[in-house]
Amino acid sequence: MCGLFSSDRKKTPDELFKEGLDCYRGESGNIDYGKARNLFEKASAKGSAKAFNYLGLIYFKEQGVKKDDAAAFGYFQNGAVLGDTDAMLNTAHMLKNGYGVQKDDYAAFLYYQKAADKGSPTGQRIVGQSYRTGFGGIGIDPAKALSWYERAAEQGDKISQEEAGLAYLKGIGTEKNVPKAITFLTKAAAAGMTESQYNLGILYWNGDTVKENREKAIELFRAASEKGHILATGYLGVAYYSGGPGVLKDTVKALELMLPAADKGLNIAQYYTAMAYIYGNGTPKDEQKGMGLLERSSENGYPQAHLELATYYGGGMHVKEDQAKATMYMERAAESGVPNAAAFAGMRYYNGVGVEKDTVKAMGYLKRSADRMEPMGMFLYGKLLIESGPGTERNAAISLIKGSAEKGYKEARSFLGRAYIEGNIVDRDDSEALFWLTKALESGDKTAIDLLDGLYEKGLSPITKNEKIRHWNLDTGGGTPEELYEIGRSFYYGRNGLELNYTEAMFWFGLTAEMGHTKGEFALGLLYELGRGTDASYEKSAEWYLKAAQKGHVRAQYRLGRLYEHGYGVPQSNYKAAKWYEKAVEQGDDDAHLALGNLYYTDVYILEREGRYHTGVIMGLFRKVAEKGNEEAQLMLGQLYETGHDGVQSNVKAAEWYKKAADQGNGVAQYRLGIMYENGWGVPQSYKTAAHYYRLVADQGFPEAEERIDRLKREGKI
């Protein structure tokens, strides 16, 4: 114990050192630096290396003595000579900074090296850092740096675990090795290293080299964000923008989290922030600001930003049409590996859209797409190879087109069917033609029907019940549009003795739509939107919805509004979306009430610019369906009353509507109701009731609610 100095001469250096350490740290009472120094001096006189190190600390830190860096250095050096690794590190520190001795980086490095050689993880890490930066004039050697990091990491040094993980992740000083990177980063992340949490989160988010796990990614981003990591906060914002495991969709909060990261250059945050401004999600719509952010995201290499810009400039959406820029951005998308972008870029060069026509460059892009086994690129490259004339390797071209057809590409299937009938580029083969044309029809290509009819007439294949029905109507003209429509419905739902078959439903709805049958037009639009019985096409969906909507079909009006709101297949326009929603609302459609309310909530300017806004107009739309039990409408009414967004503020009414939605299991409503009970807003204050609602949300996997429960417990409120 500190203060027992009797028989000091009989004590070993280690015993004297331990008593000195007791006095130094105050482990058995008060700290006494004077007694500690006395004991350390006696221990050092008997050869205790550790005692020399602590004497150095006493003089360096001015603990009970006047600060004396020169004396401190002498003590540290003596301890280092006797083999104490802490003394070696402290000697190196003094030499590195010129404390009590002339500054000498190389000499400092040698002491760090000695500590490392004796197994000090700190020494090993600093030697690794020295080889990474070239400290002390030793030269930069990333491979040696990694070797030392790994030694320190094996001893649990969290900084070295992170450095080793990042080296393997980026291929610095070694071949890139993601599994090894994950091993080191996982250990460092568990120890609280934010850069490891962030990089590991990205790996799980993208799922490129490890199985995608968004929930784990969000957990890691949240941990790093809580310690101020701006880029991790940006990814967390992206998660809130679209919602996901453990995250309630909240575009307002998403924007708040993404903006600082976007300012720091995080391309994914720039992209989603751009989308928020362009479409008015969580913020007033500002297309100019959104396009600026989207271009910054592209400049910083975000692949989807390249594709969006190519689409916008090519179609004149949100920006003036500029085909040259569209081609430039499509090329960027192709270089970034965006699926089908190389094929689109190739066709732009082939047709001279926005650039000088360049067949060589076009074929280069198309070949790249084909090499990636993209169905569109395989078909187009094979087709252009055939069209390039004699001498072309036609077998290779046909093989590419077959590969595309086998992957389900509709145009490739039709091409092969026709080719086998005509026998110009392949040997004529009706059986092969039948096979590929049938596949084309299954993909929704109605142009295959006429060719198939010719093959059926030859008796090449048994005609199924479905085909008999089809041919009877085609040949005889039998059936009214309504009867044909009902056949389509029977195929769509698989009833009335017919098996479910979306391709057949597509055929029959198509017949009635071509006859101007309103329900058939809507049904055809729906199939194109959902991609049932055909490849999905928002453009064609919008075309058929418009025909039906103009004739007063309420669901067509609603779904056409949705396409305009989101810019699917048509130029994005909140104004046009609102007009179609309004028409559906006039006919009492509940979904349209909800959609129009949400649209006005995010873009009330639609009403204001026509002088149609008045207090409660948005509430009226939501109330119509909220009273029928729609939880989303009940939630929105609660938010409108709580914030006063529609001109009427009432916490009492907010709580009433939140309660209705909460009783149906709506997590956001349960969370907001918990806050209202916690603060006594519109309801009697009750921490117990607040905790009840927080628990309901927490059990759904939302950490914010768990944090609020923990805080109430810490504050002794529950």
Image (cartoon, rainbow, N blue to C red):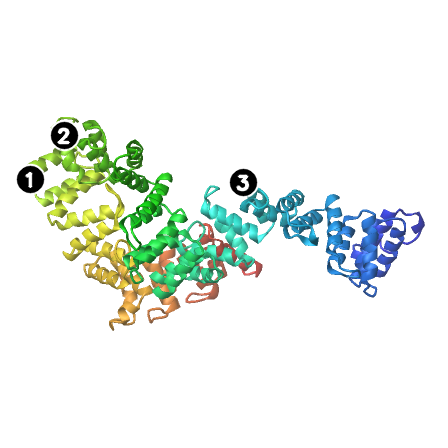
Secondary structure of the residue carrying tag 2 is helix
Tag 3: amino acid? Pro
**Image height of 353 relative to 614, above or below:** above
Q: Does any portion of residue 666 appear in the rendered image?
A: no
- The location of residue 196, given as percent across then percent down, is 56, 50
Front-most of residues 615 and 391: 391
Picture disc at residue 477: 1
Vertical placement of 156 versus 314: above or below? above
The secondary structure type at the circle numbered 3 is helix
Answer yes or no: is residue 600 visible: yes
The residue beneath circle 3 is 179
* Residue type at numbered disc 2: Tyr
Q: Nearer the viewer, mark 3 or mark 1?
A: 3
- Element carrying mark 1: loop
Q: Cα distance, mark 2 to mark 1?
A: 19 Å
Q: Which label belongs to residue 456?
A: 2
Give the distance between the C-alpha atoms of the residues marked 3 and 1, in whole angstroms. Answer: 65 Å
Q: Position of residue 127 (x, y in %)?
A: 69, 49
Apparent side of residue 205 relative to residue 575 in the rendered image (left or right): right
Q: CA distance from mark 3 to mark 2?
A: 56 Å
Q: Position of residue 346 (x, y in %)?
A: 32, 47
* Residue at the outermost front position: 391
Q: Is residue 457 left or right of residue 494?
A: left
